[in-house]
Image: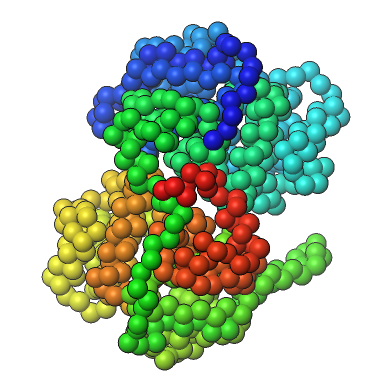
C-alpha cells in the first residue's frame, strides 16, 4: 500500500450527498445514492465494487458525461477545487475536461482515433486549451511521451495506435491525460487488460506522476491486488451505495461491511492448491514438437518480409481430470497454441495426439467426427454467442448436429443449464439478457453439450468481477471432477492459475521456458522470466496472505 503524499489540506474533488437517477424500468431507481467522498492532492482513492455497483456512472457524473435526460444527477454536489461542476454549462465543462480533469480509459484502442497519429491526438488537447505554435505543441507532446517513459517518443508521435503495443497505447493515453497537468486524474480500469509486467509499469508510472505533480487520482478498479499496491484510501460501492470507506490498510486488512468481506474472500491468493497426482488410464492429450510461424508479405511499398515464430517446439501433455495452466504475457504465443490444438489454424509441423491419434493429420471426414472431443471456452462469450438466437437453441445446436433428436437435445440443454447454475428457464432468453458471468456459464454449457474429453479455456475469467470469477472457477473445478475432463487453462493471471491449475507451463516468445507442478513453478520459480512475472504482480505481499 502506498504512502500518502503531503500536499494542500483542501480536497481537489469533493462529492457530497450525490444521487444519480436511472430511467424507469431499470433494475433499481438510482445508479448512485447519497455518495460522499473526497480526494486530496497527491492522493490515490480507489473506488472498488462489482459491475453494476455505480463506479462508471460516478465518473461520468464528475466528467459531466451522463446520458441525460435518461440518467441524471437529482441531488448533491460535485466540487472541483471549490467549483460546483453540476452548475457548469456544457461549454464550461468542455474547458475543464482535459485542462483540470484528465481521464484514462480502460481500453485505449477504442478511445484513440485509429485514423490519427498518436502525436496529433495529444496535440489536439494543447490546440484546444493552450495558445501555442505548432512547433511548441510538438515539442511539448514529445516531452510528455518521454515523461511517461515511452521508447523513441519522436517516432511514437508519428505512429498510429495500431502500431503500438497495449502498454504503449495506455502510456499514450496517460500522456494525453496529464499533458496539461490537471489537478484530478480519473483512471477507469486502466490496467485490467494489461499483462502483469506492463500493469506494474503503468501503476508505478501513475504513482510517480501523482507524487511529482501532486495530482489527485480517482482509480476505478475491481482488482484488489492493484488496490493493495497503490491506494491511499478506498471507497467500496455496492448497487449504487457507498458501503465502506477508509484507508487502504484498514479496508484490506480489517473490512467492516459484509459486502467488502465477501469481495476480499473471493480474491484468489497466490498460494497454489495441492491435489493428488493424476494417474490416468489413457494417454490424454499430447502436444509434440509443435511449430507455427506467421509471415507478412512486403506489400506494395516494398517493406521487408517479416517472420514471427509464434510457437516454437512445444511439448506438453494433459491427462483426464487434470488442469494444465498456460501463462505468459500477450504475444507469448498462448492463444496461438490454443488455436493450433483445436485446429482453427494449421501448424507448420508437429502433432496433437488424442489418445494415440494425430488430430492434425485427420482427413476432413475423420476430423468432423472427432472435433467434438476438444471444445473451447472463449474470453468474451458475448462475441461468440449468436445475439439473434435464444440460449436454448445455441446450446442445443451442437448435439443436434451430432445426431441427437430435438427432445434429447432439449433435455441435455436443460440439464446443463441447471449444472452451470442458471436453471432451465434460461433457455428462453437471449444472450443480452444475462450478465457477463452468466454468459460465461452459457459458454461453458455450450462447450459441454457435445460431451468433449478436453476443454480449452482461453482467458475465460479475465473480464469478470472477483466474486463472479470465483464462481466460474469453482464451476470449472466441479465440471472437471464430474466429467473427468482434461482442461488447458490459458491465463495471464498468476493468482487464478494458482487456484485452479495442477501444473503450469510458462510461455515466452513462443517457447515454454518453465513447466512443472503449480506449487513448484509459483512458489520456487527457476527461470528469470517466471521470476519477473511473479515480482511484477501488484499487491503480491498482501496476496500471499490470502
| Residue 170 rendering spot, x and y as whole percentages | 63, 42
Q: Which residue shows up at 58% across the image and 39% down it?
A: 111
Name, please, the residue furthest toward the bottom: 356
Name, please, the residue furthest toward the right: 135
Image quadrant where residue 49 sits = top left
Image vertical order of residue 139 relative to residue 393, above or below? above
| Residue 300 rendering spot, x and y as whole percentages | 77, 64
Q: Which residue shows up at 49% across the image and 89% down it?
A: 361
Position of 10 with respect to 258 (left or right) is right
Q: Is residue 388 among the parts visible in the rendering?
A: no
Q: Nearer the viewer, residue 399 or 202?
A: 202
| Residue 9 rendering spot, x and y as whole percentages | 58, 11
Q: Which residue shows up at 61% across the image and 71% down it?
A: 513
Image vertical order of residue 543 relative to residue 51, above or below? below
| Residue 344 rendering spot, x and y as whole percentages | 48, 73
Position of 263 with respect to 117 (left or right) is left
Q: Is residue 63 among the parts visible in the rendering?
A: yes
Tell me the quarter of the image containing the N terminus.
Answer: top right
Amino acid at each position: 500500500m502506498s504512502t500518502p503524499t503531503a500536499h494542500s489540506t483542501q480536497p481537489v474533488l469533493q462529492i457530497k450527498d450525490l444521487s444519480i437517477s436511472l430511467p424507469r424500468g431499470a433494475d433499481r431507481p438510482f445508479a448512485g445514492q447519497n455518495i460522499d467522498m473526497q480526494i486530496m492532492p497527491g492522493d490515490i482513492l480507489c473506488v472498488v465494487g462489482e459491475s453494476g455497483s455505480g463506479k462508471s456512472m460516478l465518473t461520468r457524473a464528475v466528467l459531466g458525461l451522463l446520458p441525460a435526460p435518461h440518467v441524471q444527477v437529482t441531488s448533491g454536489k460535485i466540487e472541483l477545487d471549490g467549483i460546483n461542476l453540476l452548475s457548469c454549462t456544457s461549454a464550461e465543462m468542455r474547458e475543464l475536461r482535459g485542462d483540470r480533469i484528465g481521464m484514462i480509459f480502460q481500453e485505449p484502442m477504442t478511445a484513440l482515433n485509429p485514423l490519427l497519429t498518436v502525436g496529433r491526438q495529444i496535440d489536439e488537447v494543447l490546440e484546444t486549451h493552450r495558445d501555442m505554435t505548432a512547433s511548441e505543441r510538438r515539442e511539448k507532446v514529445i516531452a510528455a511521451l518521454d515523461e511517461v517513459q515511452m521508447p523513441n517518443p519522436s517516432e511514437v508521435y508519428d505512429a498510429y495506435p495500431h502500431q503500438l503495443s497495449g502498454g504503449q497505447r495506455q502510456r499514450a493515453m496517460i500522456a494525453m491525460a496529464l499533458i496539461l497537468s490537471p489537478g484530478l486524474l480519473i483512471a477507469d480500469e486502466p490496467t485490467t487488460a494489461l499483462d502483469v509486467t506492463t500493469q506494474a509499469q503503468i501503476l508505478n508510472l501513475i504513482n510517480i506522476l501523482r507524487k511529482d505533480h501532486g495530482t489527485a487520482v480517482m482509480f476505478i478498479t475491481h482488482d484488489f491486488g492493484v488496490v493493495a499496491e497503490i491506494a491511499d484510501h478506498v471507497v467500496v460501492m455496492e448497487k449504487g451505495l457507498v458501503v465502506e470507506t477508509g484507508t487502504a490498510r484498514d479496508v484490506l486488512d480489517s473490512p467492516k461491511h459484509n459486502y467488502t468481506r465477501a469481495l476480499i474472500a473471493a480474491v484468489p491468493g497466490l498460494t497454489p492448491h495441492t491435489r493428488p497426482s493424476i494417474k490416468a488410464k489413457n494417454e490424454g492429450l499430447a502436444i509434440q514438437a509443435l511449430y507455427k510461424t506467421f509471415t507478412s508479405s512486403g506489400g506494395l511499398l516494398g517493406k521487408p518480409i517479416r517472420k514471427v515464430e509464434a510457437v516454437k517446439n512445444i511439448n506438453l501433455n494433459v491427462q483426464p481430470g487434470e488442469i494444465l495452466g498456460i501463462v505468459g504475457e500477450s504475444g507469448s504465443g498462448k492463444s496461438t497454441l490454443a488455436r493450433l490444438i483445436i485446429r482453427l489454424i494449421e501448424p507448420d509441423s508437429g502433432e496433437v495426439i488424442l489418445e494415440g491419434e494425430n488430430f492434425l493429420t485427420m482427413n476432413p471426414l475423420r476430423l468432423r467426427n472427432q472435433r467434438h472431443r476438444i471444445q473451447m471456452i472463449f474470453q468474451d462469450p458475448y462475441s461468440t454467442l449468436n445475439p439473434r438466437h435464444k440460449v436454448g437453441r445455441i446450446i442445443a445446436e451442437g448435439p443436434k448436429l451430432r445426431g441427437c433428436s430435438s427432445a434429447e437435445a432439449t433435455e441435455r440443454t436443460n440439464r446443463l443449464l441447471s449444472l452451470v447454475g442458471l436453471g432451465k428457464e434460461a433457455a428462453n432468453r437471449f444472450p443480452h439478457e444475462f450478465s457477463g458471468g452468466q454468459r460465461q456459464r452459457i459458454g461453458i454449457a455450450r462447450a459441454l453439450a457435445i460431451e468433449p474429453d478436453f476443454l480449452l479455456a482461453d482467458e475465460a475469467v479475465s473480464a469478470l468481477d472477483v466474486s463472479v470469477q470465483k464462481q466460474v472457477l469453482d464451476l470449472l473445478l466441479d465440471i472437471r471432477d464430474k466429467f473427468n475432463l482434461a482442461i488447458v487453462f490459458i491465463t495471464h493471471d498468476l493468482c487464478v492459475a494458482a487456484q485452479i491449475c495442477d501444473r503450469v507451463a510458462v510461455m515466452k516468445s513462443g517457447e515454454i521456458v518453465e513447466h512443472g507442478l503449480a506449487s513448484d513453478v509459483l512458489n520456487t520459480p527457476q527461470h528469470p522470466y517466471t521470476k519477473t512475472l511473479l515480482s511484477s504482480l501488484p499487491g503480491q505481499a498482501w496476496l500471499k496472505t490470502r
